[in-house]
Amino acid sequence: MQFLRSLYFSSRFYISIIVLIFIFSVGFSLPFFFAIGKALSLVFAVLIVIDMLLLYHKNALTGSRTLSNKLSNGDENLVSIQVKNYYSFEIDVKILDEVPEQFQLRDFAMNTSLSSGEEKKINYHLRPVERGEYHFGRINVFVNGILNLVNRRYILKQEAMVPVYPAYLQMRKYELLAISNRLSEVGIKKIRKLGHNMEFDQIKEYVIGDDFRSLNWKATARRNQLMVNQYQEEKSQQVYSIIDKGRVMKMPFEGMTLLDYAINASLVISNIAILKQDKAGLITFSKKIGTFLPAGNRSLQMNKILEVLYRQLTNFDESDFEKLYVQIKRKINHRSLILLYTNFETNASLERQLPYLKLIARSHLLVVIIFENTEIDQLIQAEAKSTEEVYTKTIAEQFAYEKKQVIRELNRFGIHAVLTKPQNLTVNTINKYLELKARGLI
């Protein structure tokens, strides 16, 4: 039974059957062809047996799947399939990996060939767009016989459950760029520091490149050589990422909700803040307050933030900004930078929440981060060719104008604001954080 389950016939087999049927059909009129058909049928049967014996005389193929113990949401995650050929001849293989159902890849297949004794790694990438558990099934490998008449299916039992976490690959990428001072490669601006919003560290000898405005003339006179004051940035400032899990964050972009974009950006900016020796914290809210993680910069803080973000669930209810304000007033006692990820489509939606935002801004440095509607941008940029399209484009421009009005209204009350496309959220958030830090506002 197991033999029959693993046996498949190739397209060459069926073509050969069709040719034999045609020859036998002609043989009804011309007996000579009937005799040829019988002879070819015998040869065909022998070839099938030979092909099957070569494929089934031993288990001659092994393989496995290699992937990370967790996947990164919104990123391209590498998956590798390793196969090795123990046959004494070259084989062609077709690999069907049972990827998690969330990807809906029903015709996912990879083809390759392996010479005798060769081991090969086949790579592919998966981009999840939601957090949660992803279940990989078996690896099915179909091996062609040397005559390519029959195929043998090998089932490699590699079932695995892999959780999809917020974009930790992005976090690592930005971390490496920050350490090597290469953040500008991904659009992070180099911002000139204004003034000396720094703590005095020490007096040292002047070297080329030091700011001459930091020269310490008294120390220079005593040592008879140029001496400068060295400063270090103020550290341990609190940076809170506050994520609105309400219905306004349900809008999708490239398969991901705005909520997941906010979660990914919060992970990255928290890591950057800790690298800058600030403290990173987290608050989530919707109809009720979800999670409150106090700001910290100890070694386990990023693991805590990652785990908290992974477990965020929501019904996309109407968000209660009054409860958010009460929570901030009770829990955050020191002036902090608050990055609030939410979305306001119109001035009317902002006006309902503006009193609470103004109260938060009195005690903290508040940055409200909202999203551009990219579909509206596409309508604005498209050329109108009919009266209906003119009306549609006019309405789209009105919506885009209201977004800009929201930003102006926030700025009017001293609230910083960022209007960003979802794909640029992380870069723009980091730029805003570095700008505020350079200006000495935190």
Image (cartoon, rainbow, N blue to C red):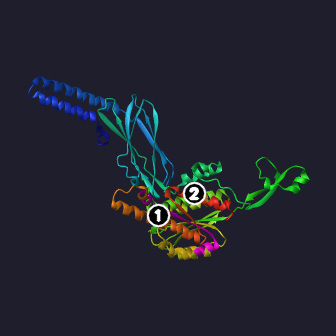
| Image-quadrant location for residue 197 | bottom right
Examine the rendered structure and indicate whether residue 326 appears above or below residue 291: below
Q: Position of residue 203 (x, y in %)?
A: 83, 55
At 14% from the left and 29% from the top, the residue drawn is 24
Q: Is residue 429 at least partly visible in the picture?
A: yes
Q: Which image quadrant: the C terminus?
A: bottom right
Examine the rendered structure and indicate whether residue 251 appears above or below residue 85: below
State how far apart marks 2 and 1 are (Cα): 28 Å
Q: Is residue 250 left or right of residue 19?
A: right
Relative depth, front residue between 385 and 340? 385
Is residue 62 within the magenta segment? Answer: no
Instruction: Indicate which label's residue lies in the foreground, 2 or 1.
Output: 1
Residue type marked 2: Val
Residue type marked 1: Ala
Relative depth, front residue between 421 and 389? 389
Q: Residue lying at the far top in this picture: please name it.
A: 32
Q: Is residue 66 left or right of residue 146?
A: right
Badge 1 crowding class, 10 Å Cα cut-off, few under 14, some 14 to 19, many 20 or more, is some
Relative depth, front residue between 62 and 211? 211
Q: Is residue 91 left or right of residue 235?
A: left
First reached walking from the N terminus: tag 2 or tag 1: 2
**Which label is found at residue 400?**
1
**Which label is found at residue 268?**
2
| Image-quadrant location for residue 17 | top left
Q: Is residue 300 at least partly visible in the picture?
A: no
Is residue 368 within the magenta segment? Answer: yes
Q: Secondary structure at mark 1?
A: helix
Magenta region, residue range: 358-378
Q: Position of residue 108 (x, y in %)?
A: 37, 45
Q: Is residue 169 left or right of residue 297?
A: left
